[in-house]
Image: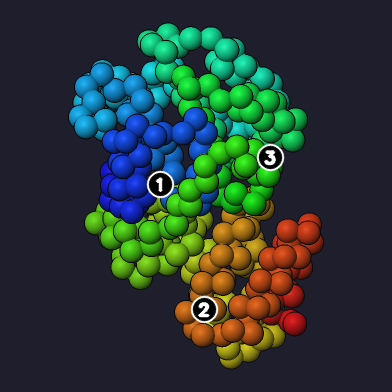
């Protein structure tokens, strides 16, 4: 997948930025859809051995190594478990203070930046407060509202809206049925996530159960309540539970059931406040 296809408008904006040599030292990419691909493409532009109109060739040794996350001056920070720890960010202090191995330039990409521990965020702030022309930082997040305002103020913020039509097209090309591809394109944040879910047994089983639940809430809410045990069965993982709420919202929207959409929103809010998952599902059916 090419970033030019995923985010064509943003691709054109960054092409212009590169051509006029105005790439900033720090960016915050919010929204997630194609943001990592963009950060990699911009990293290729920074390290490319064969720039063409200040754009990366994508074929030289440096570009290929960047694409494989094997370039020595590219540092990609990912959460360890559920958080980005302070030590991970403090380890970057040497990156900011030393020269690169291949040349002067260095790039740091921090994925899921909203998961930075508060101390980690403050440690990063110290590093980006004094811009270094040789170091570029790309912060990637699903929600920029979860990023410290002091960090946001020192980075240029770009939103990466989801391109649902593009995602659906790719999924269908990869063999996913049109109706499922449309659903996945609405609830997923990346083609990779949607592709993985389309082939996951637990997801397809859960979707069938939710579709059955939808039929029952229309005809017999008592039976729908009893059926909830089947729906909640083996859905203990938080990410899977979150996906169930997303699926319910989409299914109720498709059936034009606004009251049930509102109840699902409220149930999800309760769940995020640590109310038991099963109790939240019961709220939807019984309220």
Residue 214's quadrant in the figure?
bottom right
Q: Name the residue located 66 percent from the left edge and 48 percent from the top edge.
A: 146
Where is the C terminus found, in terms of image quarters? bottom right
Q: Name the residue located 59 percent from the left edge and 19 percent from the top edge.
A: 92
Residue 251 placement (x, y as % from top left): 51, 75
Judge by depth and name the residue closer to the eye, 169 or 93: 93
Image-based side of 228 in relation to 138, left or right: right
Q: Colour scheme in the image?
A: rainbow
Return the disc, 3 or 2, that comes first in the chain's sequence: 3
Look at mark 1 in the image and give the residue it sits on: 34
Q: Are marks 3 and 2 in contact (CB under 8 Å)?
A: no
Q: Is residue 40 visible?
A: no
Give the Cα separation between the discs numbered 2 and 1.
26 Å
| Residue 241: numbered disc | none
Look at mark 2 in the image and give the residue it sits on: 253
Residue 41 placement (x, y as % from top left): 34, 34
Q: Name the residue located 64 percent from the left edge and 51 percent from the top edge.
A: 145
Look at mark 3 in the image and give the residue it sits on: 150
Using the image, determine if residue 20 lies above or below residue 11.
above
Q: Are marks 3 and 1 in contact (CB under 8 Å)?
A: no
Q: Are marks 2 and 1 in contact (CB under 8 Å)?
A: no
Q: Secondary structure at mark 3?
A: helix
Image-based side of 230 in relation to 251, left or right: right
Using the image, determine if residue 158 lies above or below residue 225.
above
Return the disc, 2 or 1, that comes first in the chain's sequence: 1
Residue 211 placement (x, y as % from top left): 51, 75
């Amino acid at each position: 997948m090419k970033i030019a296809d995923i985010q064509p408008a943003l691709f054109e904006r960054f092409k212009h930025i590169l051509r006029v040599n105005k790439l900033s030292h720090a960016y915050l990419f919010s929204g997630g859809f194609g943001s990592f691909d963009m950060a990699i493409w911009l990293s290729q532009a920074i390290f490319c051995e064969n720039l063409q109109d200040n754009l990366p060739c994508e074929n030289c040794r440096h570009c290929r190594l960047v694409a494989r996350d094997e370039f020595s001056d590219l540092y990609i920070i990912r959460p360890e478990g559920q958080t980005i720890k302070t030590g991970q960010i403090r380890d970057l202090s040497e990156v900011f203070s030393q020269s690169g191995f291949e040349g002067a330039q260095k790039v740091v990409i921090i994925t899921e930046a909203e998961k930075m521990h508060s101390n980690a965020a403050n440690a990063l702030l110290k590093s980006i407060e004094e811009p270094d022309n040789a170091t570029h930082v790309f912060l990637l997040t699903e929600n920029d509202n979860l990023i410290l305002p002091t960090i946001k103020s020192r980075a240029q913020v770009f939103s990466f809206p989801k391109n649902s039509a593009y995602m659906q097209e790719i999924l269908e090309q990869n063999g996913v049925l049109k109706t499922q591809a449309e659903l996945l394109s609405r609830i997923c944040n990346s083609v990779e996530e949607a592709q993985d879910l389309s082939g996951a047994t637990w997801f397809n089983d859960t979707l069938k159960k939710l579709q059955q639940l939808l039929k029952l809430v229309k005809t017999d809410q008592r039976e729908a309540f009893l059926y909830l045990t089947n729906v909640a069965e083996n859905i203990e993982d938080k990410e899977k539970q979150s996906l169930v709420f997303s699926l319910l919202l989409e299914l109720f929207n498709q059936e034009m059931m606004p009251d049930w959409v509102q109840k699902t929103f409220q149930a999800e809010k309760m769940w995020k406040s640590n109310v038991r998952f099963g109790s939240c599902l019961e709220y939807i059916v019984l309220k």
